[in-house]
Image (cartoon, rainbow, N blue to C red):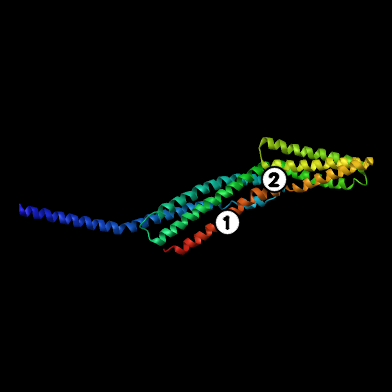
Amino acid sequence: MRNLLISRNKVSIISALAAVALTAVMLLGLPRLQQLRANSALASANAHIARADSLMSGIDVPATAAASFSSLDGINQARGALADADASLGKAATEVNLSREEAAAACGLSLLPGWYRDYLGKKRDAAGLRLQQIHMLRQAADKLGRLYAAGPVIFQAQQDIDRLTGQLETAVGQIQATPAQAQSALRQIAQSLRGVQKQLDDQQAKATFDLLAQMSQQVGNEAGAAEAAAQFASAVAAGDQGRAGSAARTLEQELLAIGAGADALSRWQSRNIDPLLNQAGDLQAQEEKLDREAAGLYRP
């Protein structure tokens, strides 16, 4: 009986020692296991970023924003390119988000070397900045898409405004010499400008877009100036100095309104597109800085 108890005690001791040894082996192996998991997550994260880079390689939103409304064909091409860009940017955002999730999960492994966790943290943060950059580019592409959707009407309105503005300046310059002829020309110019304004308003009624409203106001101001100039020409032709003086003051105010609203397209872009592209550029610079810092930490 005593021998049996001794035997059982030996077995218990051996089992306990074996359990301790197994635990020690497992504890010693866990860091290596976590590093293998981190390596796998990092490879997956890098693969997602590579796919995002490929999706974004043919996208140049800033170049599209800088392109002028030089032709209807160019407008239609830009519209198609923006539609493709939005789809590609959406897919790229999905890939970058997956990369960030992989890096974040690996960064949370507690038994990794400190340098490796710091490295993965910077990769995670860089992916976060890339997501923000893509968001800014998608916002810019969306706004530009709306611009180019109304592009044909805006393009034609610009052509008409430039032509009629030149005619308005010429007619105003002729008021003193030939007031009656200038009056007739100015009335026709005002009528044509009101027609352009109606086209812009009709397009705005189909698809609300702030630039259309701004251009409508601009051309409305020019029409008002043409109408005021016609009144001034009428007073000059009649030799009515009192009415001519009053009409001249009104004309001056209308001409100032034109100057305040000139070049609506450039002003719209500077307010709506340029800030988004500038933010996207700043985010890219921050992302590249984090990538350089991460590369300095990595120990293969």
Q: Is residue 185 visible?
A: no
Report the disc number at residue 208: none
Amino acid type indicated by mark 2? Asp
**Circle 2 Cα neighbour tier, 10 Å, few/some/many (<14 / 14–19 / ≥20):** few
188 displayed left or right of 48: right
Between 178 and 192, the one lying in front of the other is 178
Between 108 and 92, the one lying in front of the other is 108
Amino acid type indicated by mark 1? Asp
**Circle 1 Cα neighbour tier, 10 Å, few/some/many (<14 / 14–19 / ≥20):** some
The C terminus: image quadrant: bottom left
Q: Earlier in the sequence, mark 1 or mark 2?
A: 2
3D distance between C-alphas at marks 1 and 2: 33 Å
Count of all numbered marks drawn on residues in the image: 2
Which residue in the protein does label 1 denote?
282
179 displayed left or right of 115: right
**Residue 224 location (% of width, % of height):** 80, 41
**Residue 239 location (% of width, % of height):** 94, 42
Between 20 and 295, the one lying in front of the other is 20
Secondary structure of residue under mark 1: helix
Toward which corner of the image does residue 112 lie, by quadrant?
Answer: bottom left
Which of labels 1 and 2 is toward the front? 1
**Residue 216 location (% of width, % of height):** 73, 41
Between 295 and 178, the one lying in front of the other is 178
Q: Is residue 130 visible?
A: yes
**Residue 254 location (% of width, % of height):** 80, 44
Query: What residue lies at 22% left-to-right and 55% top-to-bottom?
Result: 19
38 displayed left or right of 86: left
> In the image as oriented, which residue stretches furthest toward the left?
1
Which residue in the protein does label 2 denote?
73
Secondary structure of residue under mark 2: helix
Query: What residue lies at 32% left-to-right and 56% top-to-bottom?
Result: 30
